[in-house]
Image: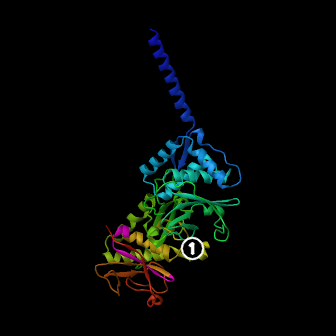
């Protein structure tokens, strides 16, 4: 009888303890809003570590050690599970890390602590990230093997580390003019951070605007009402200048795609392949206002197809990316991107076309100029000023 009572007592204690633990976990959840998706993540009090001292290697090391001695594994596990289930590219996983760090330590309240949490979450997620500091400036770097052009990086041996938070200092830190202390105490893992964007996340609670595009083609006026999601624009607010392969590979969001591409497909449905590409070429020339990045934005920008729709002005690189995307989606034709000293353009491979082709790897491609010019250039016609200039093929596309 005593044995039965003892078992009953133990069972009751375990039941109460389990219920209490469950309630405790629910009370300690981090609830994130990630592009309209509500995410509940576990938060243990052991990873709520204070950091209010001046920046130093010892202080930063102590902060990291306290975090790793706490219960953080389930938080990392669920972040990675969410990344994998939503197939987030690294750029968007980093946005998720930023959102998580903001919940753990609001950026406005303690910027250093917020940045240290991002460093910790990146490392424990399998990326190799480091810190560099000088006085009150704390820069976060991640190992990446890609070419990034408008943000600082540093090399250690053959390893390249690219700065992730340069924009937080208004892109004005003189990283080369002053000495920084590097904190590389923890090599998180073998993942190499990639800036390639192959798909956009599903966005809930959309905030749409309508952009009207007009253009004339062979004495007929065309009008398109394109749906644009304001949150998509925010996604790329701090996106750096990447190489052309990455820029030209960024897709449209599904909503914007559905509001434009089917209408373009319908418009070219009764045209042959070359006529349809010519239509898309003239559409890209005429539907947007042209201006150089320096005059329009004060610095170099490489806009994706969707960003080109968002912004009021675009240049030859942006229009080339937009035209490239349309031809790829509608016709799946091989293309090359040509880089001249002062111009970017696209050449398309047809079965046959007029004009003189450009040979690349023994195959012919015809220039299709998507940027407005004084002369109405036809397929196969190159700007006269470029005819005697050398060019580089900076991206080549072959359909699968």
Q: Quadrant of the N terminus?
A: top left
| Quadrant of the rendered image containing residue 283 | bottom left
Q: Of residues 63 and 142, which is closer to you in this image?
A: 63
Residue 78's place in the image compared with 226, above or below, is: above
The answer to if 340 sits in the magenta stretch is yes
Could you classify mark 1 by the number of other residues whose Cα lies within 10 Å: few (under 14), some (14-19), or many (20 or more)? Answer: some
247, above or below 188, in the image: below
User: Which residue is drawn at the image coordinates 64% and 52% (left, top)?
Assistant: 60
| Residue at 39% from the left image edge and 68% from the top image edge | 264
Picture residue at 56% right of the left edge, 32% below the top: 24
Q: How many marks?
A: 1
Residue underneath mark 1: 300
Query: Horizontal placement of 400 versus 6: left or right?
Result: left
Q: Would residue 300 be counted in the magenta stretch?
A: no
Q: Position of residue 70 (x, y in %)?
A: 57, 41
Identified at 42% across, 64% down, the residue is 260
């Amino acid at each position: 009888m005593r044995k039965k009572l003892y078992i009953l007592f133990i069972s009751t204690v375990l039941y109460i303890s389990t219920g209490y633990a469950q309630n405790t976990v629910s009370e300690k959840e981090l609830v994130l809003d990630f592009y309209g998706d509500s995410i509940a993540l576990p938060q243990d009090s052991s990873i709520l570590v204070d950091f209010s001292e001046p920046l130093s290697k010892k202080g930063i090391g102590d902060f990291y050690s306290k975090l790793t001695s706490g219960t953080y594994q389930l938080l990392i596990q669920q972040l990675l599970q969410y990344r994998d289930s939503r197939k987030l590219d690294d750029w968007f996983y980093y946005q998720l890390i930023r959102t998580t760090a903001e919940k753990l330590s609001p950026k406005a309240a303690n910027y250093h602590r917020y940045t240290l949490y991002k460093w910790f979450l990146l490392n424990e997620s399998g990326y190799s990230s480091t810190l560099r500091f000088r006085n009150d400036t704390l820069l976060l770097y991640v190992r990446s093997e890609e070419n990034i052009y408008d943000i600082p990086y540093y090399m250690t041996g053959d390893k390249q580390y690219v700065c992730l938070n340069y924009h937080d200092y208004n892109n004005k830190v003189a990283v080369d003019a002053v000495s920084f202390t590097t904190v590389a105490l923890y090599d998180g893992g073998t993942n190499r951070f990639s800036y390639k964007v192959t798909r956009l996340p599903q966005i809930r609670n959309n905030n749409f605007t309508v952009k009207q595009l007009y253009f004339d083609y062979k004495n007929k006026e065309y009008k398109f009402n394109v749906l644009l999601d304001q949150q998509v624009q925010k996604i790329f607010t701090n996106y750096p200048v990447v190489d052309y392969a990455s820029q030209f590979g960024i897709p449209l969001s599904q909503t914007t795609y559905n509001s434009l591409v089917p209408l373009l497909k319908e418009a070219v449905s009764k045209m042959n392949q070359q006529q349809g590409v010519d239509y898309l070429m003239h559409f890209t020339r005429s539907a947007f206002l042209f201006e150089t990045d320096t005059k329009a934005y004060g610095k170099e920008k490489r806009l994706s197809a969707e960003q080109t729709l968002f912004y009021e002005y675009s240049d030859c690189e942006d229009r080339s990316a937009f035209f490239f995307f349309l031809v790829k989606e509608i016709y799946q034709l091989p293309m090359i991107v040509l880089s001249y000293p002062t111009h970017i353009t696209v050449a398309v491979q047809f079965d046959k076309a007029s004009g003189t082709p450009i040979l690349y790897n023994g195959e012919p491609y015809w220039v299709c100029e998507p940027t407005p010019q004084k002369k109405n250039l036809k397929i196969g016609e190159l700007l006269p000023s470029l005819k005697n200039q050398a060019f580089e093929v900076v991206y080549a596309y072959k359909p699968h």
